Image (cartoon, rainbow, N blue to C red):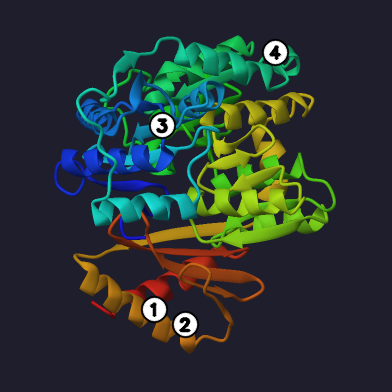
Amino acid sequence: MELFGSSGIRGVALRYLTPALVLDIAKAAGTAWDADRVAVARDTRTTGELFANAAASGLAAVGCDVDRLGVVPTPAVGNYCEAAEVPAVLVTASHNPPEFNGIKLVGDDGVELSVDVLEQIERRVLDDEYDHADWRAAGATTPVEGVVDDYVDQLIAAVDRESIADADLTVAVDSGHGAASVASPRVYRELGCEVLTVNATPDGHFPGRDSEPVPENLEDLRRLVATSDADVGIAHDGDADRAVFVDETGEFVDGDTSFAALADACLEPGDAVVSAVNVSQRLVDVCADNDADLELTPIGATNIITRTRDLHEEGTRVPVAGEGNGGVFFPPYRLSRDGAYIGARFLELLADADGAPVSEVVAPYSDYHFVRANVEYEDDDERDEMLSAARAYVETADAEPNTTDGYRLDYGDAWVLVRPSGTEPKIRIYAESADADRAERLAQDMRVAVESGR
C-alpha cells in the first residue's frame, strides 16, 4: 500500500500529513463504509483537533453524521464503535514524536480495518473517487459524552477485579501525557489498587517524556517505583494501546518478556499465537511448552489482525497475539490492543503469584538478550540502496532467510532481522540471543552491511 503502513498512516504534521490528505481519507472511508454515522476521535497531540476537524468535514461531505468523541484512548474508541455499531476515524500517531500525527480507521466492530479494506479505501484516495453529498444531505456533528466512562466500566467487568483488589497492589502509572491520562489511573484505582502517577497530565507537547514507552524514556517511572515501594510500574504510549512494565526494583521489563508471561498464562494445547516476524525466542519457547502453534506475519497491527481473523474463520482458537513492544491482543476480549487491559491482565498474574514480586514472575522468560537498532535514511533511493546492501549480506549468510517482512536469519541459538519501518524513515534491525555479546554482534554486523549502501 502507498498510503497506509503497518498501523495506519503517519507523518510529520502539516508537511506529510496535511488537512487536505486527512479530508480525502475521511471522504474515502465514509464512501467505502456507506455508513449513516461515523465517529471521530483523537489523542492529545497539538495538531489533533485540526485534523479531527478535517476528518469530520470530509465525512460530512459524503453524507455521514459525525459523533465527536474528543480526546480518548484508542481502545475506548474501539469500545464505542462496537457498542454503537459505527466505524471511526481516529487521529493519532501512537508512539511517534510530537511533531507527527496520523490516522487509524476502525470498523463498526471496534477493530482496525483489515488489509483488504484499507486497500479499497486507499484506492479511492489515489483515484479521487468519493460519493459527495449535496447540501441537503451533508452530515451533522454531535459531541458525545461518557465515552471514557463506558470504556472503564466494560474493562473492569472483563477482568478478575476481586483477585486484583485482594492482592493489595501499589501501581505506578506513567501515561506519558497521552490519551491514557484520562483513563488508566482511574482503571487501576477501580480495580482496588493504590495508584501513583507521573506524566499524567494530557499534553500533546509530551513535556515529561517522549511518547514511546522504551527504557530511555521511562526514567521518571523507574525512579518512582524504586523510591515508593510500588509493586509494579505501567507505562503507555501516546494513544494508550500499548503497555510495558517496570519491576519492583525499578528495572524495565522487556516487552518480549511480558508478552511471553502473558501468553503462557492463557495458552492451551492446539491454540495458536499470532505474532510478527521479529518474534522473540521467548514466545517460541512458550508456544512449544504449551503445544501451541506460532503464526508469523509482517510487522504491524493490521497484519496481525488480518491473520488472527483468518484463523478464527478456520476454527482455530487464538487467545493471545501481538508484538514485543507492549502491543498485546487478547482476541476473546477484543481484537484490538488495549494498554489499560494489558496492564490489568498483568496485575492478574501478580495476584495469582501469591505475593511473588514482578522480577520473580517474569524470571522464567528473561533468558534472552534483545537488541534493536535504527538506521535513518533521507529518501526512497537511499532506502532502496541500503536494503539492497542488506539483501547482499543476507545472501552470503550461513542461514536460510525468512522473507515474510524484510529478511530474518535464524541461526537456531540466535536470529537477526532487517526491515524498513512502516511508520518512520528508518531501517530497523533486530537481533536476539541467549548470549548478549552475540546479539550485539549480529545487530552490528547487519548495521555495517546496511550502512554500506549509503
Can residue 323 be seen here? The reply is no
- Cα distance, mark 4 to mark 1? 51 Å
Is the residue 274 above or below the residue 406 in the image?
A: above
When the figure is inspected, residue 113 is found, relative to residue 163, above or below; the finding is: below
Rendering coords of residue 352 (x, y %): 78, 27
Secondary structure found at label 3: strand
Q: CA separation, marks 2 and 1? A: 6 Å
Q: Residues within 10 Å of mark 4 (few under 14, many from 20)?
A: some
Which residue in the structure is indicated by mark 2? 394
**Left or right: 68 in relation to 360:** left
**Numbered tag placed on residue 390 in the rendering:** 1
Closer to the chain start, of discs 2 and 3, is 3
- Between marks 2 and 3, how big is the CA–CA gap? 41 Å
Picture quadrant of residue 296 = bottom right
User: Considering only order in the chain, which callout, 3 or 4, is on the residue closer to the N terminus?
Assistant: 3
Pointers 2 and 1 in contact (C-beta within 8 Å): yes
Mark 4 / mark 2, whichever is N-terminal: 4
- Name the residue type under label 1: Ala
What residue is pinned by disc 4?
Answer: 165
Whether residue 205 sits left or right of residue 340 in the image: it is: left
Callout 1: 10 Å neighbours few (<14), some, many (20+)?
many
* Circle count: 4
For the residue labelled by badge 1, is the local secondary structure a helix, a strand or a loop?
helix
- Identify the image quadrant of residue 336: top right
In front of the other: 260 or 124: 124
**Residue position for label 3:** 88
Amino acid beneath label 4: Ala
List x then y, in percent, for residue 402: 56, 74
Give amino acid for label 3. Ala
